[in-house]
Image (spheres, rainbow, N blue to C red):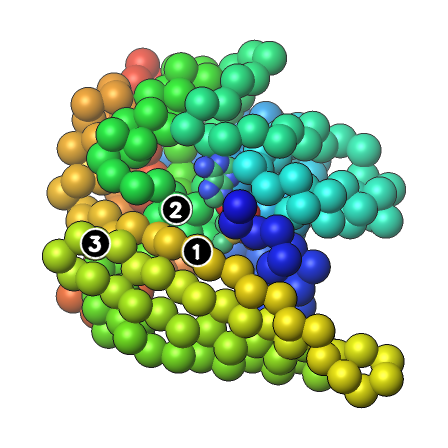
Amino acid sequence: MIYRELSRFYDSFNNSIDYSAWADFYEDLFSDYAGRKVNSVLDLGCGTGSMTLELAGRGYDMTGIDISADMLSVAAQKASDMNQKNVLWLNQDIREFELYGTVDAIICVLDVINYLSDISELRKVFSLAENYLYPGGLFIFDVNTPYKFENCFGKNAFVFDDGSTYCGWQNYYSKRSGNCSFYLSMFERNPDGTYTRHDEYQREHCFSMRTISRAATDCGLEKCGVFSGFGRENPDVKSERWHFVLRKGNGIGKNE
Ligand SMILES: C[S@@+](CC[C@H](N)C(=O)[O-])C[C@H]1O[C@@H](n2cnc3c(N)ncnc32)[C@H](O)[C@@H]1O
């Protein structure tokens, strides 16, 4: 089971991510590409809810879905600490999620799509997104690119140390299968100076631009744009993250 042990350390390891700036970027995309006003947003693979809560704080009606009950319990605790009651947290698999109704936008933040194994799983998520979006609604997600898997993750090791936990992280990427294995070992410092070790294995899949675009078309989602990183630049051979903006048809397209 992924994101069990890691859930307690996740926010500390990711504290350099500026979710506020990222949410600004989403709001720009909403206003430029959505064929309707965005009020309700579904966050697929919401994890510890950093983006879900950022958008809830800006007045959006939020739903967060994650397969990891441990990540969701961190998210729910954060919501309670912030007295944020406007989020519905659902412990579900994004490959077969069910909602009570439709939403104006769906986001999927920080590599969540890379946890899918192949194009058939991509199609499952995309067709569910299409099903639960209002016409003109947006599906925005980011992925790690082939360049990043080959040149940054491939056979590299990383370490983090936040003062209370040390994490060693080893990767193996196979270009042939497109799979990247991540072996994480976390050493949590105890009050007596000893350490408790926690291990976690994860796997991400590398999708090409063409595979993602084909799956989107197959599921009736139109591609409004693909951007490099967090701006509006076109992807180039060294892009490490692509943002896809897909839209359910029949919207009143803007800025195209
Ligand atoms: C890298 S984290 C991103 C979390 C969050 N979106 C963020 O910005 O911090 C990936 C998340 O995707 C979730 N996830 C992976 N596969 C999933 C699936 N099939 N269904 C639901 N959640 C999934 C994991 O549990 C984890 O919380």
Determine if the C-beta at disc 1 is less than 8 A from ligand 1: no
Q: With respect to residue 199, does 46 lie above or below?
A: above
Q: Is residue 99 above or below residue 173?
A: above
Question: Going from the N terminus, do you reach mark 1 or mark 3 first?
Answer: 3
Checking the image for residue 178, the label placed there is 3
In percent of the image, x 80 and y 39: which residue is there?
84
Q: Can you see residue 168?
A: yes
Q: How far apart are marks 1 and 2 (CA)?
A: 8 Å
User: Mark number for residue 202?
Assistant: 1
Give whichever of 1, 114 is nearer the camera.
1
Choose between 228 and 240: the one closer to the eye.
Answer: 240
- Name the spot of residue 56 as percent of width and height, x first: 69, 39
Dot 1 or dot 2: first in sequence order is: 2
Query: As drawn, is 3 to the left or to the right of 182?
Result: right
Q: Are marks 1 and 2 in contact (CB under 8 Å)?
A: yes
Front position among marks 1 and 2: 1
Say the numbered circle drawn on residue 217.
none
The percent position of residue 202, horizontal first and vertical second, equals 44, 56
On screen, residue 117 above or below 195:
above
Residue shown at 58%/33% (left/top)? 65
Residue 115: which numbered mark, if any? 2
Give the quadrant of residue 246.
Answer: top left
Residue at screen point 14% across, 43% down: 210
- Ligand 1 has an atom within 8 Å of the beta carbon of the residue at disc 2: yes
Q: Is residue 127 above or below residue 55?
A: above
Q: How would you rate the neighbour count of disc 1 (Cα within 10 Å): few for under 14, some for 14-19, many for 20 or more?
A: some
Residue 186, percent from left and from top: 60, 72
Determine the secondary structure under disc 2.
Answer: helix
| Amino acid type assigned to the residue bearing label 1 in the image | Gln
* Residue at image point 40% right, 24% down: 129
Amino acid type of the residue tagged 3 in the rendering: Gly
